[in-house]
Amino acid sequence: MRRIIAFVFAFNALVAAAQPAFVKDSLDAFVEREMKRWQVPGLALAIVKDGKIVRCQGYGVRDFRKSEPVNELTLFQIASNSKAFTGTAIAHLNYEKRLSLDEKVSRYLPYFKLYDPASTDMCTVRDVLCHRLGMQTFQGDFLNWGSKLSRKEIVEHMALTKPVHPFRYKYGYCNAGYITAGEVILAVTDTVWDDFIDARYFKPLGMKHTSSRYKDMVSDANACVPHSLVRGKLVAIKLTNIDNMGASASINSCVADMANWLLMQLDSGRFNGKQVIPFPVLAETRRSNMIVNDVRSPIFKTKHFSTYGLGWSSYDYEGRRVWEHSGGANGFVTKTEFIPEENLGILVYTNSDQNSLYDALVKQIIEAYFGMPYRNLSEKYFLAGVEGRKKEIAQQDSLVRLAEMVKKQKMVPDLKAFTGVYTNELYGTIELKLEKGNLNMYMSQHPNNIGRLSYLGNDKFLCVYSDITCGEMVFPIKRDASGKPIAIDVRVNDFIDYLPYTFLKN
């Protein structure tokens, strides 16, 4: 027995010694310095190499207003990192012949419809998982994200979402497609997506702290507070309930649990010697179904392409194939990457949605394991965006000053003319109300998010949302020939939805 214990200690020491100098000697200092650069309050990371968890730890704090530290068990909303679980679940059911990836979605969900009837007739389960429905990236997410809609209602609203591109023509990241896949799992197994992935993956992988429901995140004493930046200043924000996003984005987890997910991925579906997922299932999730881009990266010179499988993106780097996914929620950005050829996997989670450190740090660690010369990728990311951030802050400040000047000089028109209910076929309704001299916007699907409108002149309003992640946006007003307001264009930050929504006055 003593010999076995001595061997285990010796083996673990050998594994630790085999790590690159950056990971052994410089990682902690690097992370702490770069967190300050990006104003990231808390970060957690895990590194899996050669079947071992060689790093699994937290940095900083869960809430920048307090001192509770982030550790390896601290929860983050991992958002779209959830998609790999959904893609795996569908591929698993396909392997078990309980469904077919290439069968029409409408066979499993008779109520499923796309905007174009021909597309509905052609659309397969695989199509909704690899983002080739013709949608613009994030199209529909202003309606869906954190709204009152149920998962089924989000699927039903796809029939009202007019695609930007022809069906299967171009990659367009579509969260509603993954919500659809979750409803397919329910239809086939009579088990909601949440319970299915818990039984099939969370429990067998010992992911005791992982869940997919808002209430579990809210009630956990070791959960992060989400943060954002408003004109360059860090603020804590309210956790968003994204239960309705389900199979596309609703998992809460920690790096300790997700390291087990990576160990399984890198051991052909085995965990602790047990086959949790048949390897053909994993292979199916990794197979390329759609080209994301084939443009050479300006920072990563040997990255030439990116494709999408079933919940995983993949790209080439330094002659290796990398599989990855990121996740972004209000106040969080997170990253998962793994490289089977190097038996290497990396997780980086942050509790701020305004940073690129989450991605730069993963690439920094990869380059260390590849033996590449050191270069500070976080600094490169930061400097590449400095001018853009300064310009954005200056524009926002300028708009606020303009609104104040217009009001001070009494150039504001009669705001009563703009009040009333406005309708968008996809979203539903908004109502503009005049309250204590201010024009406020109330949204039917987001009752807790109120927009305060300030007149800018030239039939434009500046909208400042109470949910700061939606941004400070300019809304144009349209009038009829007699000068009466008849429509307003509403939009949110691009990382929620790129497209404006035109609301017509009732």
Image (cartoon, rainbow, N blue to C red):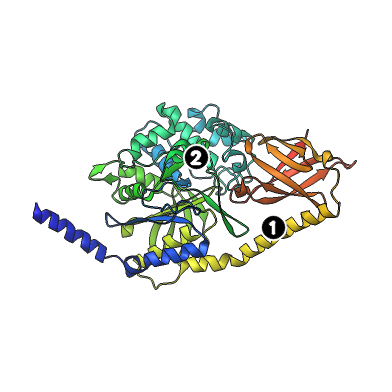
Give the structural element (helix, strand or loop) at label 2.
helix
Image: 408 above or below 168: below
Tally of marks: 2
The circle on residue 84 is none
Other residues around mark 1 within 10 Å, as few (<14) / some (14–19) / many (≥20): some
* Displayed quadrant of residue 195: top left
Other residues around mark 2 within 10 Å, as few (<14) / some (14–19) / many (≥20): many
Give the structural element (helix, strand or loop) at label 1.
helix
The circle on residue 396 is 1
Question: Residue 34 appears at what percent x and percent y?
Answer: 47, 65
* Displayed quadrant of residue 217: top left
Asked if residue 403 can be seen in this view, the reply is yes
Image depth: mark 1 or mark 2 in front: 1
Query: Which residue in the protein does label 2 denote?
Result: 178
Pointer 1 or 2: first along the chain = 2
Image side of residue 16 versus residue 282, left or right? left
* Displayed quadrant of residue 22: bottom left
Residue beneath the point at 48% across and 60% down: 357
